[in-house]
Image (spheres, rainbow, N blue to C red):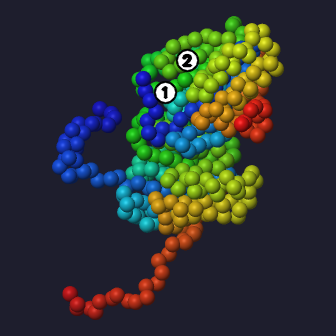
Amino acid sequence: MASLKPGEVNLGTTIMAVEFDGGVVIGADSRTTTGPYIANRVTDKLTKVHDRIYCCRSGSAADTQAIADIVQYHLQLYTAQHGEAPTVKVAASLFQEICYQNKNALLAGIIVAGWDERDGASVYNVPLGGSLHRETYSIGGSGSSYIYGYCDKVFREGMGKEECIEFVKNAVSLAMSRDGSSGGVVRLAVITKDGVERMFVPGNQLPPQYEG
Amino acid sequence: RAGFKFDNVKRNELLGEKGYGLPTATKTGTTIVGLIYQDGVILGADTRATAGPIVADKNCEKIHYLAPNMYCCGAGTAADTEFTTNMISSQLALHSLNTGREARVVTAMTMLKQYLFKYQGHIGAALVLGGYDVSGPHLFSIYPHGSTDKLPYVTMGSGSLAAMSVFESRWRPGLSREEGIEMVKDAIEAGIFNDMGSGSNVDVCVINKGRTEYLRNYSKPNERVTKEQSYKFKAGTT
């Protein structure tokens, strides 16, 4: 499997996506690093690939941007040819195809999430090797290691939109304070059949937690 | 056949062992910056080009022309930044003629990132791309591996940390032209005086709606002092 080349821009990262009845809530930190330097402290790692389908990017910035651009192109073509929006499953499958077939050259951990007419809300995780996993909620990136326990304990099936937003905000925030490669601000997006609502929590307005 | 040929790798390794190492590519060491101000974007760059510890060029031009409304600062391997920007500039000119429209900054950004990604970081071009098109002013940083960031102020090169400290303490939205140019000048000078890979003069480029001003050697804080003596030899000495 590939590893970051020296000097390559790294998305370090904490990313997360949670399904609820009627939509998904996705969230990410905003730090991009080259070695010890923070190249971008306000990165937007939640990338649109279609009107109601977003991906959360972690790993190599160059690889994930290139992959997302290619998938966005394919989904645009799909819409033009089929006359209807693709499902989240289709988008996730495209990500998988690229990540699996080029696994030796890529360093990309991607979470695909969105809403479509056929299946409603869906979250798919495409980790490093290019496997595909549909999950009710998913976490990824270097910062996710620190919040597995928190997420497993706090998550419940049947949470509403507001509860999911708080869950994502808190979890990403906790990861950011423990992972050096995650930080900055928390970016969130809520995707439902009515559209996409983007939210933003500045670094100094994060939920209170023990700081020592 | 396209792509790099690695046939000479073994030969070069052998030569290296015998003491005939490869010449180092001229690097621009460099401090390059860009910022968005009220009416557009301002780009800045130092003018030192290095080959290892030697200054190869004391007054090189690191702000490259891409289109009448777009310029690109380049850090990293000098040849790579020069040829890459020239190539995309050429493609943009054809694109503009083909579409009948002024080129957009995102178009240049996409062409550059896809080209650099294809070469997986082997083309050492780190760029600060700025311009003004129908959708307003835009500023991007582009890394050798092909990732891009869209930001209101950016710095790249070995002097980027010195320059960024200036921006982080002073940048705010809605800067005037004078404030913007002064800030860019100060950021580049921070690189010139605190980074050994950067030096000599400050080049500035101001791009706003319908107008671009390339201010070559806007500031020259390192001019050589007048020599105290004349070292001219009498005609006929040799």
Q: Which residue is mark 1?
A: A107
Image spot of residue A169 (x, y percent) = 74, 27
Q: Residues within 10 Å of mark 1 (few under 14, many from 20)?
A: many
Identity of the amino acid at label 1? Leu
Q: Quarter of the image for the N terminus of chain A: give it.
A: top left
Of residues A169 and B81, the one drawn nearer to the viewer in this rendering: A169
For residue A44, side relative to residue B28 (left or right): right
Image spot of residue B5 (x, y percent) = 28, 36
In this rendering, the answer to whether B166 lies above or below B136 is below
Image spot of residue A109 (x, y percent) = 55, 23
Q: Which residue is mark 2?
A: A126
Q: Secondary structure at mark 2?
A: strand
Cα distance in 3D space between marks 1 and 2: 11 Å
In this rendering, the answer to whether B149 lies above or below A107 is below
Q: Quarter of the image for the C terminus of chain A: give it.
A: top right
Whether residue A47 is visible, yes or no, is: no
